[in-house]
Amino acid sequence: MYRSQQSASTCCSTGTQTDSMQGQAPRLSKVNLFTLLSLWMEVFPSSKHVQAIKKPQRIKKTGLVVVRNMKIIGLHCSSSELHAGQIAVIKHGSRLKDCDLYFSRKPCSTCLKMIVNAGVNRISYWPSDPEISLQPENPSQTSLGDARLDAKAVERLKSNSRAHVCVLLQPLACYMVQFVEETSLKCDFAQKITRIHPEFQRSTFYEYRQDRVKEYEALFLISSEEKHKEILRLMGLENLCEDPYFVCLRQNMKELVLVLATVAASVPSYSDFGFYLSETSDDNQQGLTQEIAQHCIIQARLLAYRTEDHKIGVGAVVWAERKCSTLDCDGTGSMYFLGCGYNAFPVGSEYADFPHMDDNQKDREIRKFRYIIHAEQNAITFRCQEIKPDEQSMIFVTKCPCDECVPLIKGAGIKQIYTGDMDSGKKKADISYMKFSQLRGVGKYSWQQNPRRMSPNSTKASTSVENGDLKNKEEDDSGFKSKRMCYGERT
């Protein structure tokens, strides 16, 4: 399951002599994609109300991805009152039968007995501190003892259930970390900032990434090897405590955390950049907070690394917002997942079935554009729930929707689009982006500077639009400057 250090070093020492990626682009495996999404769901932004509620110190917030037939049908995270596994049972019920569940932490016995009873096929978890923490940090002996008893109960449930409870980490494809780094620097969001603020250079991006690396390593990794081994043994993973398996396990975990941090840094809270309405006529639209909008676009960025298009990866994710928030039990609040996708060839096709050439190929007959399914099309096609016309639905796309997808998005009843607009209004060889700027009746939230920011020379208090909502800005004038390095903060 885990590659050895020798094979990893050999793999990285061969190949091209250039500093950038060459040839066929690497892809994330589905297992690693689901794992990364579960980790990312663990840090889903919480409201101030939820943050104010004190949870038991030993119970860790957990992210969860529900998969059926290798398609994502649910993205969840634990709330102030319910664990992620309990939320999955509430939201999906008996539909969990034969599903695969990917947890960001090993679930507790309370969750495991319910999801096993629902008939799930497989339960994968991140091999670090479990949902009920086994870390001996300022604990009472009673709470630590209860955590160990729960770990034993989980092992008994595991050994006596039909569901396969396991660790499904896979080594990243060769050069994957380098590829993610290069494409994150070149993505529309980082490029838009660079175009307006030339001082936002590679060094600034790396500063953002380093901050995210520190944050996520503290959250998802155990710094002490001995503590990590002790927790693995308590979780019934003694076989992973011996070298070379243990060394490779920790290396794979570090690489995945680095990938997550790199992708997260590609949509930074730099200056006053965010997702703002691009049309003043749509000012009546109720938008999301910047934190949630950025979180969802990073979900789409992760999905893009499953692309089958070797030139450009695109990811899309569709969410909706319930009208009544009093019934919400999920850690995502009133938001709920509808579907996701990435650009790929038709389901069931083999690599050589269709052309892979881009517009550099003079013969238009053997270009890919007539055969590739766009990310937005896959997200709408494989949605797990219907789009309700009376609820606020939104799609998050890593690139501006093309003329082929814009009518589909509007026709599906999606109310809002969150995307970059670098290609808006452009007409390329095989694909056009003219319809996006002409689209009416759908709120278009483009990645841009706040269009109503306070003028530097103005001394009057002004109002600013945060995703379409007018909010009084009586804070000090340094508000926007202080946002430069606050990506990890939530409101």
Image (cartoon, grey):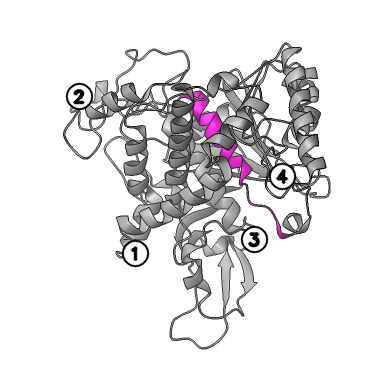
Q: What element does badge 2 sit on?
A: loop
Which of the two residues, 41 or 369, is positioned nearer the viewer here? 41
Q: Amino acid at mark 4?
A: Gly
Q: Amino acid at mark 1?
A: Ile
Which of the two residues, 232 or 379, is positioned nearer the viewer here? 232
Q: Residue at x 55, y 35 (%)?
A: 226
Provide the residue designation for mark 1.
196
Q: Amino acid at mark 2?
A: Asp
Q: Which mark is residue 331?
A: 4
Provide the residue designation for mark 2.
363
Q: Position of residue 288 (x, y in %)?
A: 62, 55
Q: In this rendering, is residue 161 above or below 489?
A: above
Q: Residue at x 29, y 27 (%)?
A: 9
Q: What element does badge 3 sit on?
A: loop
What secondary structure do most residues of the magenta stretch adopt? helix
Sequence-first disc among 4 and 2: 4
Q: What element does badge 1 sit on?
A: helix
Magenta-drawn segment: 29-48
Q: Is residue 92 left or right of residue 408?
A: right
Q: Quadrant of residue 374?
A: top left
User: Would you say residue 405 is visible in this rendering?
Assistant: no
Q: Position of residue 400 (x, y in %)?
A: 42, 46
Which of the two residues, 404 or 146, is positioned nearer the viewer here? 146
Provide the residue designation for mark 3.
491
Assess whether mark 3 and mark 1 are in contact (beta carbons under 8 angstroms).
Answer: no
Residue 32 inside the magenta-drawn segment = yes
* Residue ranking furthest to the bottom: 459
CA gap between label 1 and label 3 equals 27 Å
User: Would you say residue 45 is visible in this rendering?
Assistant: yes
Q: Position of residue 259 (x, y in %)?
A: 43, 39
Q: Residue at x 41, y 28 (%)?
A: 172
Quarter holding the C terminus is bottom right
